[in-house]
Image (spheres, rainbow, N blue to C red):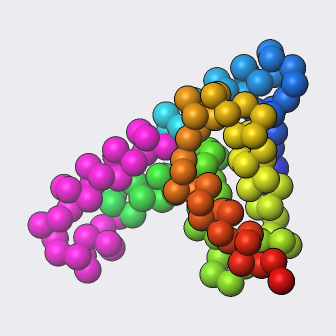
Amino acid sequence: MWDERLGWAFELIADDLAARTAALVRLAEAQRKVADALGRSNEMWWLTRPLGVDEQYREPAFLQARQKYQQAQRGSLPDGLWNSPVGEDPATSPRLPYVLLFLEREARYPQEWTRHAKSWGTKQSLIRDLARRIP
């Protein structure tokens, strides 16, 4: 499942400039989809506010917009790394290669990472999550 959603992202650390450039284009498109879906979700949140909290979160249009936003997040970085299951051991998690990819990308291409994918909060959270598991 992870490879289907984010397998392409390993090209972000490729030595081949053409492969890395293609992956950057794909990342930009994925991030655009996340932003668009977030905008739609926020719009539906605003439009359904008069219903009250309980009804709002049962409103099909709002639920669908939230679902599309979450789906878009799963296919992008760093969003796809968020919301791991509570209590998940990062050392055995199927997301571990993608966490390491995210961190490795900064190490190999810091200017590119800062320009296209900077997410200090995600980085901090991932490092702390991994460090908690070290005996």
Q: Classify the position of the N terminus by image quarter.
A: bottom right
- Left or right: 63 with respect to 47? right
- Residue 39 % position (x, y): 34, 44
Q: Residue at x 73, y 21 (%)?
A: 22
In the current view of this chain or complex, which residue is farthest to the top?
18
- Residue 61 % position (x, y): 33, 58
- The answer to if 49 sits in the magenta stretch is yes
Q: Residue at x 20, y 62 (%)?
A: 48
Q: Name which quarter of the figure residue 10 lies in.
A: top right
- Left or right: 16 with respect to 84? right
Q: Classify the position of the C terminus by image quarter.
A: bottom right
Residue 80, relative to residue 133: is it above or below? above
- Residue 40 % position (x, y): 34, 46
Residue 104, relative to residue 32: is it above or below? below
- Tell me the magenta residue range: 34-60
Q: Residue 119 versus residue 23: which sits nearer the camera?
A: 119
- Residue 85 % position (x, y): 65, 76
Residue 50, relative to residue 44: is it above or below? below
Q: Name which quarter of the figure residue 132 lies in.
A: bottom right
In the current view of this chain or complex, which residue is farthest to the left?
50
Q: Name which quarter of the figure residue 7 lies in.
A: top right
Majority secondary structure in the magenta region: helix
Taking the image as drawn, is residue 8 in sight? no
Q: Residue 86 versus residue 44: which sits nearer the camera?
A: 86
Q: Residue at x 48, y 52 (%)?
A: 68
- Left or right: 54 with respect to 84? left
Q: Residue at x 25, y 70 (%)?
A: 56
